[in-house]
Amino acid sequence: MSCHTLIIGGGAAGLMAAIAAADRGDRVTLLEKNERLGRKVLISGNGRCNVMNLDPDLVHFHGGNPNFARHALSAFPVEETLRFFHDLGIETRVENRGRVFPASNQAASVVDLLEDRALHAGVRIVTGADVADLRRDGGFRVRAADGRAFEADRVVLTTGGTTAPSLGGSDDGIRMACRFGHRCTPTFPGLAPLETERSALHKLQGVRVTVAAEALVDGRAVKSDVWELLFRFYGLSGPVVLNLSEAVAPLIRERLVAVRINFFPGLHANALDDFLRERWQRHPHRSVGFSFTGVLPDKVPPVLLPLLGVSPDQRAGDVSAKTRRRIAEGLTAWEVRILDIRPFAEAEVMVGGIVTDDVDPRTLESKLVPGLFFAGEMLDVHGDLGGFNFQWAWSSGWVAGGGG
């Protein structure tokens, strides 16, 4: 028998939940507080929308219970996601690290085709509907801020998290869930730039370099990656830093957090020492600073070498073995103290959310409130940078909508 499903939140997870519910025969209403669906999707990937990643490994997903996401990701896996987008009419292109983008390089095409698919399935879409109250009295009763009322047999909350507040990011859905007795972990910006102690590194503002980096907590490495680093006036950014940040976001103000940078990925200090010795033997007339031309961005050596006690103008052939070793060790294990993480306005995802212990991982239905389901960012599940958070949105939305 058909039931009425109400989706609250018209982002990635909400659109997928609406489509899944309609495909199983439900009458579906989707409420979105903005006048445009998928506003966060529209800005994702610098407007290109990294829709998914080809690597299905659960290691890329994090939260209080790392195994919670397993069922949803298996129920609507990478292969099914690719088929779904192909059926929508979105041709895809795979870039490095398994990242999948629409061939159009336009996030708007993703939102437009998802909206078209939902409408074609019979979903009633109501925009400008900012939900002010959600109650359960037999069924569910919803009241929008402008006084409009809605009723439903089942509700799927897909309101997202507090990232991108200018686009409507908020904790509205989390507060609704908490009024029903659900718990929420503390939340933090994730996949966000990191603020560092003031140092000469700030002179490298705007410089990009591929590095190997480790996030350290009290001197212990908790996550590592090799990707592009971007120096900013406040500290560190770029994909490698964003990816490390989720692992340390809750700890920065309580523990000693640092990032260790290897400017020569794949080389340890001994190997770099040998590399420099051979390089300087071939070109002993060059200055130490100039000797890095072709292997590091030109702005990097004049800033880093003085911090290692080496003049960039010193002749390479005159550098002692001891000094060369100091340079090799410094450039393969440069530690930068982290003071804070940038705010939610600059974050890609929210770390934390609704505690998953009270949610059935097979259906994403509340264990406390029958008929109430959750999907997407508002749950305490987040992924690495590179399309994993969209995969969680598609998979969890499909399951919560009734597809799983």
Image (cartoon, rainbow, N blue to C red):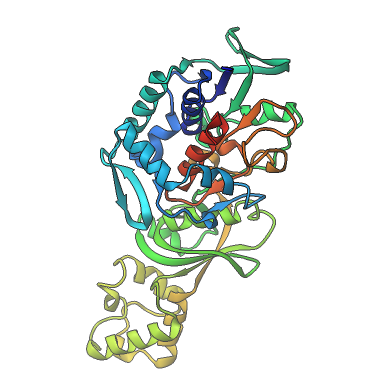
Q: Give left or right: position of 140 versus 274.
A: right
Q: Give left or right: position of 93 versus 73.
A: left
Give me the residue at 46% from left, 41% from top: 390
Q: Residue furthest front?
A: 1
Q: In this rendered view, identify the residue nearer to me: 41 or 158.
A: 158
Above or below: residue 246 compared with residue 335: above
Res. 235 visible in picture: no
- Which percent across, then down, holds residue 89? 29, 33
Above or below: residue 112 compared with residue 275: above
Above or below: residue 183 compared with residue 25: below
- Which percent across, then down, holds residue 324? 40, 86
Give me the residue at 65% from left, 55% from top: 251
Res. 153 visible in picture: yes
Quadrant in the picture for residue 55: bottom left
Q: In this rendered view, identify the residue nearer to me: 93 or 306.
A: 93
Give me the residue at 59% from left, 27% from top: 156
Q: In this rendered view, identify the residue nearer to me: 72 or 326.
A: 72
Quadrant in the picture for residue 41: top left
